[in-house]
Amino acid sequence: MSTIIVDKIAKSFGATKAVQDVSFEVRPGEIFGLLGPNGSGKTTSIRVILDIYQADSGSVTILGGPMTNEKLNHIGYIPEERGLYQDVPIERCLTYLASLKGLTEDQIKERLPKYLAKFDLTDHAKKKAKELSKGMQQKAQLIAALIHDPEIIIIDEPFSALDPVNTQLVKDLLIEQRNGGKTIVMCTHQMNQVEQLCDRLVLIDHGQVLLQGELSEIRDQFRTNEVIIEALNPLPEQLNGVSRIEKLNDAYRLTPQAGISAHDLLNELVAQGIELNSFEVAVPTLDEIFIRVVKEGNGNDE
Amino acid sequence: MVMMNKTMNVARYEYLHHVGNKRFWLSLIAVPLGFVLIFVVSVVLSFLSFDTRPVGIVDQGNLIQIEPDNSEKSTIFDFQILLNLYPDEGTARTAAAAGEIQGFAILPEDYTSRFHLTYWTDKQPGSDVQSAITNFISQNLLLAENTDSATFARITEGSKISLQSLDGSQTSDGTGWHRIVVPVVIGMLNFIVVMSSGGYLLKALVEEKENRTIEIMLTSVPSRDIMAGKIVGNLGVGLTQIAVWVLLLGIAGFIFRSRLGLLADISLPFSYLAISLALMILSFLFTAALMATIGAAMTSTEESQGVIGLMVLPMMFPFYFFTVFLNNPNGILARILSFIPLSAPLALSLRMAFTSVSPLEIGLVFVFIITFTLLMFWLAGVVFKRGMLQYSKRLSFKEIFNKETRNA
């Protein structure tokens, strides 16, 4: 059974339709990517899931039913715009936020030092949030989202403001949480992170779902027969069975004509006496798919 | 039960966040310290400006039978006018010219027929000088009529008048200076407590909106529980302020008990205090909901400060129209201000101190204010849910009451 089922939700603010007919499911123990350009309706969708907003129509099922006050204790949330009390020491701030998630004083006393140590914040526990770097604040925010050991983690732009070392720390942490059976919904613009972490994703724009499914399926869906080669000698202007030759930095992208396979292209290159350093079938990156789908507005028949 | 705990966690955090702050205690001490400072400065200034030189009396009519009693000396709390007798105008004038006395009064031979005397001086005498002279002369005139000094003392003290309302519900000793002072003090306390603790609430909400903490809180605690916790916490802050001030007053009263005999005159009925306190709490709740509404609708602390200024006006109305309350406590204006939540605590306290207010009217005031408060809480709930997540732009009236946006 899916952990989160979003079924045809719609939400308008006045004349603005923030979300229309959006549906997706998040399965247990997966990292699910919720993608979309700015203003696409991602945050509204999350707020509807979290019951901060009431949907005009449609429904959300979470952990087997509608949202309840008790279920709030099983969700960890990090909004896109981080929220920490700036004038309060982070230890006190995290203690307070953990108490709002239903943890007892003893539980907080036991868990908080471990998390502070894990995120290398022990020495900064008495400092106010405003005295910490953005990266440290981000880590403190992660503690607030994880300390109550939630079943669902909803995290918006988890890697913003993090340096490469801390980015890796967060990635490892998300993988660790997933491996521990947690369900993670991740909103991000960093497609390389989605490619590395997400099992499935949904892409929404203008409040509507444009694309969704498993990452590998989506890649296959947008796969072409294009190949990328590195040649030791210049290519001729025309090759049999090739409709387009595009010069890249140190390589060429070849677009085959209809009915021509990668194998046919390789044979043609060999026949032309072109010495190759590398030959690979081009797989579209998620970035390319994202831009293409959003630009063309297609893929919503998925 | 869990939600109740969370509400109490919000309340405890709000309370400790403010009460545990050095600034809270500094401002808490600064207010009574300011009053004490003003009192001390005014007493010292009036003592320094008080002319301690004696006043001369020249008795041309042979009316003076006893020597003036100059045994009591002036203190900073109790000024005494000393009187010196001079045999003739020339001696008195020489003493005045030498600065030994501040002036002198000449009782002419025909004083008992005209009761008119002349006071010679270079500066306007205060009422204490005039009282000292007339009391001394009256005492001598009464002694001439064989009135003993004890009877004289009683006569000069005057009558004690007791006031009783027509319906018998209220009594007063008539001299009652505290009838003015007590409601004014209650009004000031109410103003300071409501504005400061309400101000804390507004500041907390706007800050949570500015630093986005509110979004984390809304995914942990329902909005109505957040509101309830904040209001309870900040009400606790306000009540702590009152408790500390009352404690300080008690300590001061104990230390200066020998000097504050006049406080013994104060006898306040329990109902008066109970009604004033209940009104103060209701006024706080109304203000808290109003502050929450403003905090949720505004986008920055600076923006919200301007709106607070507007709220001060109605709270201060009873002070602005103080003479209206004094002269006509059951007039239309005094009654209208009794029904407005922000001005009601002071308005009704003043009216109850100056006149008899019927229980029916007091009951109606409570019904009105409770209704207003509930409506304000409803509005606060609507604005809170809609406005707290609207970071970049102020919530408009149209958006608040637009059905399509209200269920956000």
Image (tube, rainbow, N blue to C red):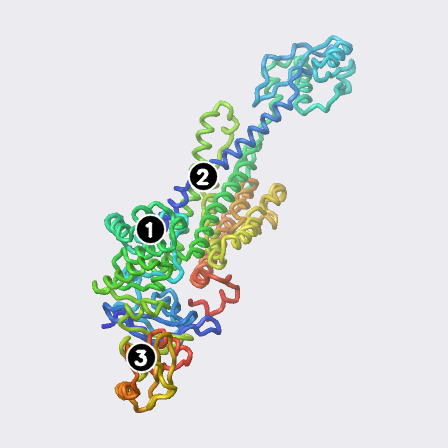
Q: Secondary structure at mark 1?
A: helix
The image shows residue A104 at horizontal and vertical percentages of 26, 51
B175 to B192, vertically: above or below: above
Q: Secondary structure at mark 3?
A: strand
Residue type for callout 1: Tyr
Q: In this orientation, does residue A54 appear?
A: no
Q: Chain of mark 2?
A: B
Q: Callout 1: few (<14), some (14-19), or many (20+) C-alpha neighbours within 10 Å?
A: many
Q: Callout 3: few (<14), some (14-19), or many (20+) C-alpha neighbours within 10 Å?
A: many
Q: Which residue is mark 2?
A: B270
Q: Which residue is mark 1?
A: A96
Circle 3 or circle 1, nearest the eye: 3
Foreground pick, B346 / A101: A101
Q: Quadrant of the C terminus of chain B?
A: bottom left
Residue type for callout 3: Ile
Q: Secondary structure at mark 2?
A: helix
| Residues marked 2 and 3, same chain | no
Q: Earlier in the sequence, mark 3 or mark 1?
A: 1
| Quarter of the image where one finds residue A291 | bottom left
Residue at the (43%, 36%) spot, across then down = B244
Residue type for callout 2: Phe
Foreground pick, A4 / B174: A4
- Mark-to-mark CA distance, 3 and 1: 57 Å
Q: Chain of mark 1?
A: A
Q: Quadrant of the N terminus of chain B?
A: bottom left
The image shows residue B372 at horizontal and vertical percentages of 49, 56
Question: Could you tell me if the residues under marks 2 and 3 are in contact, i.e. CB atoms within 8 Å?
Answer: no
The image shows residue B55 at horizontal and vertical percentages of 69, 16
